[in-house]
Image (cartoon, helix red, strand yellow):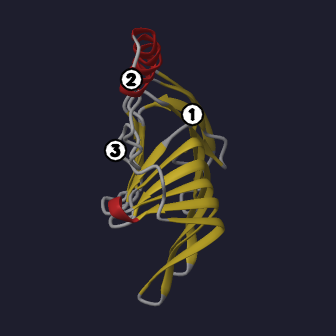
């Protein structure tokens, strides 16, 4: 090879070597968070019913469901649900998206969330909520705003929402503002301004 030919080959090889060195050939199926990018199962227009002791516990539907078997997660898009107690709907709601841990049935909902608790005649609206199934807790983000609406006219906005389904209690850990309607001793409804 002549000196000119060697120089031309080096001129072609050097940029190609630099280009290849700058590229990663690791096209694994994990994203930055450690979650697989490619689901094991993808379903469209899904309806799922969870039954225990021959009674429906939960029914949910989604436009799209992606199941990741290795980590036991199902991702749901445009998600709605109903939860049942003794055959009656006890809670229902919707979210832009949800991530369900299949073993625990814990659910993280985001993308705009509304949950209605039928027995309490209450609705919760926020950007994201977490349901911890075994503890029966519904949690908003510590610094996130949530709105509570009741049929009686109660309309409260607060930070750090938490509801305990077993005790039938709800609270905020941060500032609260709005109107809370309580039943007084004589049976008449009265409204109180709430603010912190």
Q: Position of residue 90 (x, y in %)?
A: 54, 67
Mark 1–mark 2 Cα distance, whole angstroms, equals 62 Å
Check disc 3: other Cα within 10 Å, few if <14, some if 14-19, many if 20+: few
Relative to 126, 24 lies left or right: left
Is residue 100 shown above or below 180? below
Check disc 1: other Cα within 10 Å, few if <14, some if 14-19, many if 20+: some
N-terminal of the pair, mark 2 or mark 3, is 2
Q: Residue at x 59, y 63 (%)?
A: 81
Check disc 2: other Cα within 10 Å, few if <14, some if 14-19, many if 20+: few
Labels 1 and 3 touching (C-beta < 8 A): no
Please tell me whether mark 1 or mark 3 is closer to you in this view: 3
Q: Which residue carries the number 2 mark?
A: 17
Labels 2 and 3 touching (C-beta < 8 A): no
Q: Quadrant of the C terminus?
A: top left
Q: Residue at x 35, y 57 (%)?
A: 167
Q: Which residue carries the number 1 mark?
A: 156
Q: Could you say which is closer to the camera, residue 166 or residue 17? A: 17
Q: Position of residue 113 (x, y in %)?
A: 59, 45
Say the numbered circle drawn on residue 168. none
Q: Quadrant of residue 116?
A: bottom right
Q: Which residue carries the number 3 mark?
A: 34
Q: Quadrant of residue 162?
A: top left
Q: Residue at x 38, y 33 (%)?
A: 24
N-terminal of the pair, mark 1 or mark 2, is 2
Circle 2: element type: helix
Please tell me whether mark 2 or mark 3 is closer to you in this view: 2
User: Which residue is at the far bottom?
Assistant: 54
Is residue 108 shown above or below 13? below
N-terminal of the pair, mark 1 or mark 3, is 3
Circle 3: element type: loop
Q: Position of residue 57 (x, y in %)?
A: 48, 76
User: Which residue is at the far left?
Assistant: 135
């Amino acid at each position: 090879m002549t000196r000119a030919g060697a120089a031309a080959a080096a001129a072609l090889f050097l940029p190609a070597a630099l280009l290849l060195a700058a590229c990663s050939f690791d096209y694994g199926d994990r994203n930055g968070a450690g979650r697989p990018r490619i689901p094991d199962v993808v379903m469209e227009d899904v309806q799922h019913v969870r039954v225990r002791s021959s009674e429906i516990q939960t029914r949910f539907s989604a436009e799209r469901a992606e199941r990741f078997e290795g980590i036991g997660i199902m991702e749901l898009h445009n998600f709605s649900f109903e939860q049942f107690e003794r055959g009656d709907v006890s809670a229902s709601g919707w979210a832009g998206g949800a991530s369900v841990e299949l073993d625990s049935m814990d659910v993280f909902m985001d993308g705009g969330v509304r949950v209605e608790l039928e027995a309490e005649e209450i609705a919760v609206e926020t950007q994201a909520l977490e349901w911890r199934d075994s503890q029966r807790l519904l949690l908003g983000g510590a610094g996130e705003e949530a709105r509570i609406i009741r049929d009686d006219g109660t309309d409260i906005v607060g930070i750090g929402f938490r509801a305990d389904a077993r005790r039938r209690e709800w609270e905020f850990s941060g500032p609260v503002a709005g109107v809370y309607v309580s039943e007084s001793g004589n049976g008449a409804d009265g409204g109180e301004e709430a603010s912190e």
